[in-house]
Image (tube, rainbow, N blue to C red):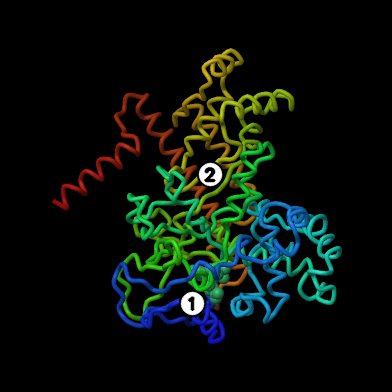
């Protein structure tokens, strides 16, 4: 670590004496406040020229445009740049940084088949992309590494340019990179309405001292580009890939749901990590990774967030009262087709799906705490119950139907939730028992169990909420005056406000 700090300072980085770098149990390194720190304080600065990206590495020039382009799209050129810079040892300007990066990961890319099986029906398993990455390496990267022995030292093929090093550097980017636009590009572009550019004060675009917010990269390019990308999409994607940068020092900050107290901003010549809250002496300094669900945290970073549940939560009395409030569980449209069109032929199902997609409908639905009954999913259920004439009408109006949570639609939604829940092979009680009895630092089995448990809990709550709404509907239709849960919630909020006053 001290080697890294000397490298960082020699390269022009500054670190406030109020900030320490230390080990945190279960998180490896992180930053700590060595004294009370006020909001708006500069914790450290990073000169732009020490960012490692496809813009700053010399590899592009050494390879020439044709071979550089042949490395492929997405993150491949950056991954290979990192492999190459690392192979240069002391000759690389980033040696002091790269030497300190992790070589081992608990991200899903490195899990065995048995470990992955513990995630049961979580759809995260389909987003790991190990096979695609292996194919990219073998088809695009490996041939160039072999052919350009003037650039890639053949003696280092096994140690620095192997498929394993390709995965390791890909995982370093996945868990540590930031999206950093060029200053000129930022000045020229219009960021109106883009939440990622919500800096504290960027109204004055002409003022080049105005800092702009930088965040961890949120999605891999391969996940963003669709198969029909036209030329301008590709250009845009390429620009975005060039904006992906490894940012020494900024990537030492850990993150935890709801804990963020520092953010990275960029100015013309430096990047600046600024406290966004008062931080007490001894507290950890946290950045944010965008508060993703635990399944995605596990895939990209190799850990999960374990947040104690609020007492108001319906599961708060569980033997394992923890959650990640950002959790979600995915339901694929295929399951809706199986349940709602169970008598239809495969070609009828696929025709209906094509129209649904052409009207802008989704093929996957995410259930989370704020939308347990998932309005978009109810819409598709409603759509699947329409007659052919009604579908034609929707196409003519280019409009998807509304999905109100009631009657038949809701009954089908409950059937979908139940079917989705039955795809998990362990019970909620069994998982809670295992997790509450678990001792020691969380391992892969613990994390997988927690992910699947939270997904099942969401489904169970969705079923309960759906059944409650149906029961109230039934009571109303029998002449009762039961209120719908949403009305009750509104009243409760009004009462709370009254008490506050
Ligand atoms: C951007 S790096 C942060 C620095 C890292 N701890 C280090 O030692 O270099 C992200 C990695 O830190 C670890 N990490 C970050 N936040 C964590 C948390 N809340 N719990 C456990 N590990 C965490 C994970 O291994 C993650 O992949």
Q: Could you say where residue 21 lies in the image, as x and y percent from the top left? A: 46, 81
Image mark for residue 86: none
For disc 2, the marked residue is: 366
User: Would residue 256 be seen by someone viewing this image from the given angle?
Assistant: no
Disc 2 CB within 8 Å of nearest ligand 1 atom: no
Image mark for residue 12: 1
* Nearer to us in this view, 216 or 93: 93
Placement of the N terminus among the 4 image quadrants: bottom right
User: Would residue 159 be seen by someone viewing this image from the given angle?
Assistant: yes
Of circles 1 and 2, the one toward us is 1
Residue sitting at 47 percent across and 29 percent down?
Answer: 403
In primary-sequence order, the first of circles 1 and 2 is 1
Residue sitting at 79 percent across and 70 percent down?
Answer: 152
The residue furthest bottom is 2
Look at the picture and state if 29 lies above or below 355: below
Residue sitting at 47 percent across and 82 percent down?
Answer: 22
Task: Tell me the CA gap for discs 1 and 2.
Answer: 45 Å
Look at the picture and state if 102 lies above or below 197: below
Quadrant in which residue 494 is drawn: top left
Quadrant in which residue 96 is drawn: bottom right
């Amino acid at each position: 670590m001290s080697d890294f700090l000397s490298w960082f300072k020699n390269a022009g980085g500054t670190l406030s004496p109020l900030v320490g770098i230390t080990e945190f149990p279960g998180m490896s390194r992180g930053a700590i406040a060595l004294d009370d720190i006020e909001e708006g304080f500069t914790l450290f600065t990073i000169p732009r020229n020490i960012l490692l990206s496809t813009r700053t590495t010399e590899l592009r020039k050494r390879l020439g445009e044709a071979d550089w382009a042949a490395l492929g799209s997405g993150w491949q050129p950056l991954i290979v740049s990192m492999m190459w810079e690392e192979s240069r040892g002391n000759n690389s300007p980033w040696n002091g940084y790269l030497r300190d990066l992790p070589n081992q990961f608990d991200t899903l890319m490195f899990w065995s088949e048995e470990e992955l099986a513990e995630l049961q029906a979580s759809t995260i398993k389909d987003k790991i992309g190990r096979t695609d990455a292996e194919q990219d390496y073998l088809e695009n990267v490996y041939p160039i590494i072999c052919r350009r022995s003037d650039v890639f030292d053949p003696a280092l093929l096994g140690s620095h340019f192997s498929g394993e090093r390709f995965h390791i550097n890909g995982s370093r980017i996945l868990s540590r990179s930031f999206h950093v636009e060029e200053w000129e590009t930022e000045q020229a572009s219009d960021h109106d309405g883009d939440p990622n550019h919500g800096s504290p004060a960027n109204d004055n675009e002409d003022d080049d001292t105005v800092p702009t917010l930088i965040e961890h990269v949120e999605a891999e390019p391969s996940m963003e580009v669709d198969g029909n990308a036209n030329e301008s999409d590709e250009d845009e994607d390429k620009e975005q890939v060039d904006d992906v940068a490894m940012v020494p020092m900024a990537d030492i900050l850990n993150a935890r749901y709801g804990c963020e107290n520092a953010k990275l901003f960029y100015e013309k010549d430096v990047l600046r990590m600024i406290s966004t809250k008062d931080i007490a002496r001894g507290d950890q300094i946290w950045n944010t990774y965008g508060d993703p669900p635990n399944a995605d945290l596990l895939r990209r970073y190799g850990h999960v967030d374990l947040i104690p549940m609020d007492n108001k939560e319906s599961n708060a009395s569980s033997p394992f009262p923890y959650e990640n409030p950002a959790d979600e569980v995915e339901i694929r449209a295929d399951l809706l087709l199986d349940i709602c069109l169970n008598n239809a032929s495969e070609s009828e199902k696929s025709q209906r799906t094509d129209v649904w997609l052409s009207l802008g409908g989704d093929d996957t639905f995410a259930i989370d705490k704020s939308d347990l009954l998932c309005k978009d999913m109810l819409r598709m259920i409603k759509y699947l119950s329409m007659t052919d004439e009604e579908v034609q009408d929707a196409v003519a109006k280019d409009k998807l139907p509304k999905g109100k949570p009631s009657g038949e639609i809701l009954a089908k939604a409950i059937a979908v939730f139940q079917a989705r829940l039955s795809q998990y092979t362990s019970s909620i009680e069994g998982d809670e028992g295992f997790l509450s009895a678990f001792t020691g630092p969380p391992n892969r089995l613990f994390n997988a169990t927690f992910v699947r448990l939270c997904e099942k809990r969401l489904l169970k709550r969705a079923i309960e909420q759906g059944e409650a709404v149906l029961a109230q509907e039934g009571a109303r239709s029998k002449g009762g005056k039961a209120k719908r849960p949403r009305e009750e919630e509104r009243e409760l909020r009004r009462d709370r406000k009254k008490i506050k006053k």
